[in-house]
Image: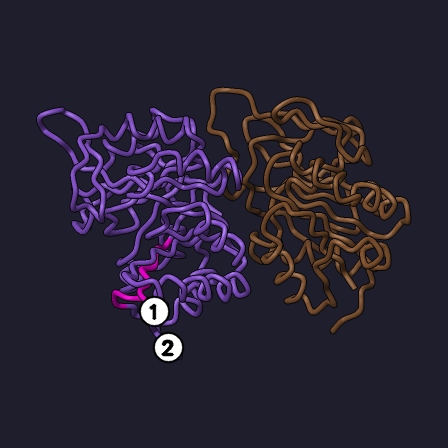
Chain colours: A brown, B purple
Amino acid sequence: MIAIIDYGMGNLHSVSKAVERLGRDMVVTSDPEAILAADGAILPGVGAFGDAMANLRGTGLADVVQAYAASGKPLLGICLGMQLLFTEGEEHGVHRGLDLLPGRVVRFQGDYKVPHMGWNELTFKQTSPLLEGVDPGHVYFVHSYHALPEQSSDLLAVADYHQPVTAIVGRGNLFGMQFHPEKSGDLGMALLRNFTDLTGAKRK
Amino acid sequence: MLAKRIIPCLDVKDGRVVKGVNFVNLRDAGDPVELAAIYDREGADELVFLDISASVEGRATMVDVVRRTAGEITIPFTVGGGISAVEDMKRLLRAGADKIGINTAAIRNPDLITDGSRTFGTQCIVVAIDAKYNAEWGEWEVFTHGGRNATGIRAIEWAREAERRGAGELLLTSMDADGTKDGFDIKLTSAVSGSVGIPVIASGGAGNAGHFADVFAEGLADAALAASIFHYKEVSVQEVKTALHGKGVNVR
């Protein structure tokens, strides 16, 4: 079973449909017991960093996600969900994140269009079970803030948007994707399939 | 590098695609979900559904179309047409739409842009602008109600205000070019795109693959939208992309 964590931020429908299409048992839930019992968990999210952390704390789910990460079972943050894995975010003031990966989330600054919106090409930085058998290509990004991991060993893939942009992060059982794999065609589905394979979640 | 996006647009009325569609092997040429899946397979980068239903029932049907589409396709899609309240946006986003397009309602009530982007994030709010050249002004004027009503508002000014209020993207239709198949309106597109810091989707006038290359190179567009040339199979999304690739434009 894969738990898609519902903490009141954004569109869970597309993510859940994508996992369903991969043939895995899936539940969209805010129930701590259901999350902690799952073989794998996905933290999605669209919206602002501060609001998201307030929701996670208010519902007690911040502790649940941290406990889940410590359990060693695979956890995937998507888009804002990836950013929340870091130490802090600077969206409308500085907010403490889940602090599972050292690093900060900052706004794009420069003479170019923000949000970084559209299809951009991945460059893989290291090997990972998440990238196994996958060829880099275009995936769909929509974001105005980007993550700066402190440790280069956590950076699995980047995209080029006036600077290297953190696209995929990973450390042990923790993974994050800044783009939307559920909206990224075949390549996105291949990456999600690798994640669901890692969870060992039962096939339907 | 960020790729230029090609976006087919489907007009939907009461849950059915209107305007001709020339695809073979369709079980049902009027089903928006089936067509969306075909465009996804052909390499479309995004889709736009324009709901032209006039009735409450028709609009309710759109929510179901959105829900079914979200389960079928693996690319983002925008829904526009007749959306005039944050509640409408919420219903469609919850059903699985990625972005909401607003046009006439945003002119009538610009706070809708502000409220929508504050509630759902700027990336969800696409402000659609229908513009026509006004010779007296020497620049473009915004029209509403599907191009029927002049507003007296300058398109470039409105584009800037939409951005200030939190629009994540602009869908810019040239009423002068629309339907001509003579190419996108390069002057309008470059004037607006050069005036804002958010992506601009050019719309209106696409007649062949070369027109897309022009609007990206000279029009400074970030994406280009077309309806009839794709529906009538005059050119496929894949052919447009191959042509763009050949001209050195970065596409997926």
The percent position of residue A50, horizontal first and vertical second, equals 66, 32
The percent position of residue B88, horizontal first and vertical second, equals 43, 52
Task: Give the left or right position of residue A167, taking residue B87 as reference.
Answer: right
Q: Is residue B136 above or below residue B111?
A: above
Which residue carries the number 2 mark? B28
Same subunit, labels 1 and 2: the answer reads yes
Report the residue at 75% width, 55% height from top: A195
Q: Is residue B180 above or below residue A146?
A: below
Depth check: A183 or A13 in front?
Answer: A13
Report the residue at 76% width, 71% height from top: A203
In the rendered structure, the residue with mark 1 lies on which chain?
B
Report the residue at 34% width, 58% height from top: B51
Task: Give the left or right position of residue B215, taking residue A145 as reference.
Answer: left
The kind of secondary structure element at disc 1 is: strand
In the rendered structure, the residue with mark 2 lies on which chain?
B
Q: Nearer the viewer, mark 1 or mark 2?
A: 1
User: Callout 1: few (<14), some (14-19), or many (20+) C-alpha neighbours within 10 Å?
Assistant: many
Q: Which mark is residue B166?
A: none
Asked if the stretch drawn in magenta spans residue B138, the answer is no
Q: Earlier in the sequence, mark 1 or mark 2?
A: 1
Q: Is residue B155 above or below residue A123?
A: above
Report the residue at 74% width, 41% height from top: A56
| Residue B214 seen in render | no
Depth check: B142 or B88 in front?
Answer: B88
Q: Is residue B27 above or below residue A95?
A: below
Magenta stretch: give its range.
Answer: B8-20
Label 1 – label 2 distance at C-alpha: 10 Å
User: Callout 2: few (<14), some (14-19), or many (20+) C-alpha neighbours within 10 Å?
Assistant: few
The percent position of residue B95, horizontal first and vertical second, equals 52, 58
